[in-house]
Image (tube, rainbow, N blue to C red):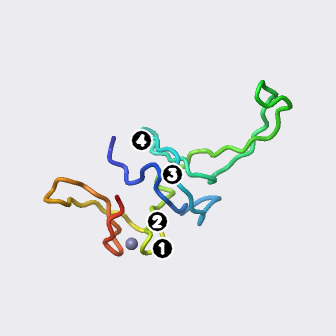
Amino acid sequence: MMGLKIRRDDQVMVTTGRDKGKTGKIVRVNPDKETVLVEKVNVVKRHSKPSQKHKHGGIIEKEVPIHISNVMLLCAKCKGPVRVGRKFIENGAKKVRYCKSCNEVLDK
Ligand SMILES: [Zn+2]
């Protein structure tokens, strides 16, 4: 893993594309493809065939992963998308992400 700046459960804002400006929680990160799945972002509707579970089939909504460069981490303090840096704390014992705008540590 290359040390992606986005992790599961992060709150992010979409910065480009159809869902630009939308915010959501990271559901899944794919480090190989460098994509993320964001809750309720890039939702597509698909027709599903009837199955055991859905006897009549129907339309299902499903999120499609977007590239990691299309999202920015939200800083709770700045209340907006921010650039993320990394630094060591606790005498180098721990590496954390921090907000480059307000220096708030983003990893709890
Ligand atoms: Zn901040």
Per the rendering, the mark at residue 32 is none
Q: Residue furthest right?
A: 56
Amino acid type, residue under disc 2 in the picture: Leu
Q: Who is closer to the viewer here, 108 or 50?
A: 108
Which one is closest to the eye, mark 1 or mark 4? 1
- Badge 4, how many Cα within 10 Å: few under 14, some, many 20+? some
Residue 74's label in the rendered image is: 2
Q: Which mark is residue 79?
A: 1
Are circles 3 and 4 on residues that touch, CB within 8 Å? no
For numbered disc 2, what is the local secondary structure? strand
- Give the mark nearer the N terminus: 3 vs 2: 3
Query: Please, what is the three-letter code of the amino acid marked with disc 1?
Result: Lys
What's the amino acid at mark 3?
Ile
Which mark sits nearer the N-terminus, 2 or 4? 4
Task: Specify the quadrant of the image occupied by residue 106.
Answer: bottom left
First in sequence: mark 1 or mark 2? 2
Q: Is residue 61 left or right of residue 23?
A: right
Residue that numbered label 4 is attached to: 31
- The answer to whether the residue labelled 1 contacts the one labelled 2, judged by CB atoms less than 8 Å apart, is yes
For label 1, the SS is loop
On screen, residue 43 above or below 73: above
Inter-mark Cα distance, 3 to 4: 13 Å
Query: Residue placed at 56% from the left, 58% from the top?
Result: 24
Label 3 close to label 1 by CB (< 8 Å): no
Using the rendered view, name the quadrant where residue 46 is placed.
top right
Separation of marks 3 and 1 at Cα, in angstroms? 17 Å
CB atoms of marks 1 and 4 within 8 Å? no
Q: Quadrant of the N terminus?
A: top left
Quarter-of-image position of residue 105: bottom left
The earlier-in-sequence mark between 1 and 4 is 4
Q: Earlier in the sequence, mark 3 or mark 1?
A: 3
Spatial separation of the CA atoms under disc 1 and disc 4: 26 Å
